[in-house]
């Protein structure tokens, strides 16, 4: 194996689970897997130019691929919260209180604009710093801070109003995005680099 | 819940377990991705910062007489290509004839492979897996259909993984970045406006390029295989006769627009790319053996590392088509179109260059699409 192949394999082993996990918060599993594959294909093509740390750059590529996928499929992008609501079906072992708290939080998250959901989950779920998350969404660190601050404020307000019985449950089908992914026949992804990398 | 950090902690706690990254990549995905990606050269972006790969056209095509370059009548003449490949001693795995002798000509070799084809063990999985690299070298900017100058020569290619099952075909195609033959070719391409380049299409605006990673799933009658000039469904493929005479008659019908012996040979080679019974594969080799004009080249390395036995067919005065067969597995490893007189074909490469090729780099049987042997 060449040095480049060894380096790439290491990169893949280190980051693929997190890239796939990120894609799964934005798309169905078949699409997410193809997006993760496409992301590492781009990384291989740009191996000599990868910044350090690599993860924010990889997530930015994955984010672009997801956008192109939805644009090509003519579908509205699935939001983090809508997919989380589907992924968070309670299991038999879950404590009732925890189920309620999670449902409340996801309902609050679902009530926010997609940009807020993205900013919040990049930090809270994907463990990125504000600077790394700024790389993913393609803005300055300062701009991301402002966005995150506002998103947190709106989330808190949404949680505080969540006790109202009229608020929809995250399991309400109306809160779920349209099914995403392939149409069963042609599923195409355009691999691309983050706009700022071009 | 008052503090910002408290909100973020509560949000983190609400993260569904399904979104947690696994400790290690999924093994099957990892094997698929690494095999697909590492098959490409690293750092393959072109000067425009893009990797203009091409979408698979959607139908299985195993070369043969379908390249636009191929046409005209065959004329046998002196052969610079064969001089590049002096006939060596038979390679390991070269079959013997029924009498135990090494085949001395293409006919004997192909008949021996036909015998071998029916003795091979049964498939060990539900899907036939193949990794195929298709490429073509073209010179653009020479006027007419090739566009205005300055002229540049470039190899365009794509890599496709096929999983072929009883009623399902998955094709995952990655377009490779264009490879300019010299720095001057790249410079001329830039002077021409750096148009987007993709296999099987004229230079285009970058926006018009198809995706560089394409996944196509075909089922039932949507799964087709090109044999001669026909697209056969899986059902039609399964009904191909195992009797060599009847198969030859069926293939003649499939090449009716250009019923030359070269096309008959090529159509029989097409059958080897389809999921047919061993008896039909054997019949296809027998049809090939029955066509006059094939020449045995001996051991021949296929780009990518595999080695087989070459059989050449003079397709026209200026070019040969070379079929590389793995005698041990009765697989068709490669079909290459070799330019004997590239200038007359309109491609600026040295004589003897393979200007079009379909290479089967890997093959085997697996249980599910996505797996690799």
Image: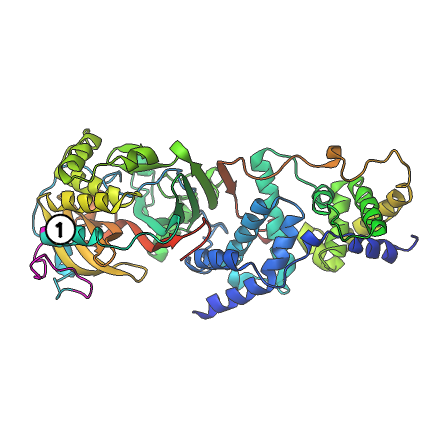
Colour scheme shown: rainbow
Residue B28 position within the rendered picture, expressed as x and y whole percent measured from the top left: 50, 57
Q: Residue furthest front?
A: A92
Boundaries of the magenta span: B91-107
Q: Which residue is mark 1?
A: B111
Q: Residue at x 30, y 46 (%)?
A: B138
A105 relative to B345 in the view: left or right: right
Q: Residue at x 83, y 57 (%)?
A: B9
A101 relative to A29 in the view: left or right: right
Looking at the image, which is closer to me, B100 or A65? B100
Residue B314 position within the rendered picture, expressed as x and y whole percent measured from the top left: 13, 46
> Disc 1 on helix, strand or loop?
helix
B11 relative to B211 in the view: left or right: right
Q: Is residue A64 above or below residue A11?
A: above
Looking at the image, which is closer to me, B182 or A18? A18
Disc 1 crowd rating (10 Å Cα; few below 14, some 14-19, many 20+) is many
Whether residue B95 appears in magenta in the rendering, the answer is yes
Whether residue B316 appears in magenta in the rendering, the answer is no
Count the labels in the image. 1
Q: Please, which chain is the residue tagged with disc 1 on?
A: B
Q: Quadrant of the C terminus of chain B?
A: bottom left
> Can residue B164 be spotted in the picture?
yes
Give the quarter of the image for residue B225: top left
Q: Residue at x 56, y 64 (%)?
A: A13
Chief SS of the magenta region: loop
> Can residue B314 be spotted in the picture?
no
Looking at the image, which is closer to me, B328 or B316? B328
A195 relative to B148 in the view: left or right: right
Residue B51 position within the rendered picture, expressed as x and y whole percent measured from the top left: 47, 50
Looking at the image, which is closer to me, B248 or B138? B248
């Amino acid at each position: 194996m060449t040095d480049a192949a060894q380096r790439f394999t290491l990169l893949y082993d280190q980051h693929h689970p997190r890239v796939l996990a990120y894609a799964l918060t934005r798309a169905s599993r078949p699409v997410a897997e193809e997006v993760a594959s496409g992301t590492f294909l781009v990384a291989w093509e740009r191996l000599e130019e990868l910044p350090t740390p690599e993860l924010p750059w990889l997530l930015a590529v994955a984010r672009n691929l997801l956008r192109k996928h939805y644009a090509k499929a003519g579908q509205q992008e699935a939001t983090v919260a809508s997919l989380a609501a589907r992924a968070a079906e309670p299991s038999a072992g879950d404590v009732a209180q925890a189920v309620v708290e999670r449902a409340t939080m996801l309902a609050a998250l679902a009530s926010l604009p997609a940009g807020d959901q993205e900013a919040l989950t990049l930090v809270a779920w994907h463990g990125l710093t504000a600077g790394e998350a700024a790389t993913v969404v393609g803005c300055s660190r300062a701009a991301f801070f402002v966005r995150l601050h506002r998103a947190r404020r709106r989330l808190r307000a949404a949680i505080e109003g969540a006790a109202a019985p009229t608020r929809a449950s995250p399991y309400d089908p109306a809160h779920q995005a349209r099914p995403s992914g392939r149409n069963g026949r042609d599923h195409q992804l355009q691999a691309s680099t983050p706009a700022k990398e071009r | 819940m008052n503090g910002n950090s408290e909100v973020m902690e509560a949000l983190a706690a609400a993260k569904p377990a399904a979104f947690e990254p696994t400790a290690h990549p999924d093994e099957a995905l990892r094997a698929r991705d690494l095999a697909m990606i590492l098959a490409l050269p690293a750092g393959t972006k072109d000067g425009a910062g893009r990797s203009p790969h091409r979408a698979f056209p959607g139908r299985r095509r195993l070369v043969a007489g379908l390249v636009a370059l191929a046409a005209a009548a065959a004329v046998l003449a002196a052969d610079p290509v064969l001089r590049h490949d002096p006939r060596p001693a038979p390679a390991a795995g070269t079959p013997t004839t029924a009498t135990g002798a090494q085949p001395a000509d293409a006919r004997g070799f192909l008949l021996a492979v036909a015998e071998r084809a029916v003795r091979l063990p049964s498939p060990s999985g539900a899907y036939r897996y193949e990794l195929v690299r298709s490429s073509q070298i073209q010179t653009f900017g020479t006027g007419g259909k090739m566009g205005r100058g300055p002229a540049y020569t470039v190899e365009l290619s794509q890599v496709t993984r096929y999983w072929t099952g009883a009623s399902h075909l998955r094709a995952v195609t990655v377009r490779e970045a264009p490879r300019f033959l010299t720095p001057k070719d790249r410079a001329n391409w830039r002077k021409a406006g750096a148009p987007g380049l993709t296999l099987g299409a004229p230079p285009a605006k970058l926006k018009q390029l198809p995706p560089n990673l394409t996944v196509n799933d075909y089922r039932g009658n949507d799964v087709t295989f090109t044999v001669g000039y026909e697209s056969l469904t899986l059902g039609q493929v399964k009904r191909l006769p195992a009797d060599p005479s009847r198969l030859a008659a069926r293939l003649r019908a499939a090449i009716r627009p250009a019923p030359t012996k070269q096309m008959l040979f090529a159509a029989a080679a097409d059958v080897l790319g389809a999921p047919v019974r061993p008896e039909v594969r054997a019949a296809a080799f027998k049809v090939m053996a029955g066509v006059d004009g094939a020449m045995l080249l001996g051991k021949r390395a296929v780009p990518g590392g595999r080695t087989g036995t070459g059989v050449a067919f003079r397709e026209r005065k200026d070019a040969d088509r070379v079929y590389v067969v793995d005698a041990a597995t009765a697989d068709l490893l490669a079909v290459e179109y070799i330019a004997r007189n590239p200038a007359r074909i309109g491609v600026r490469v040295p004589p003897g260059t393979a200007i079009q090729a379909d290479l089967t780099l890997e093959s085997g049987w697996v249980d599910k699409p996505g797996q690799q042997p």
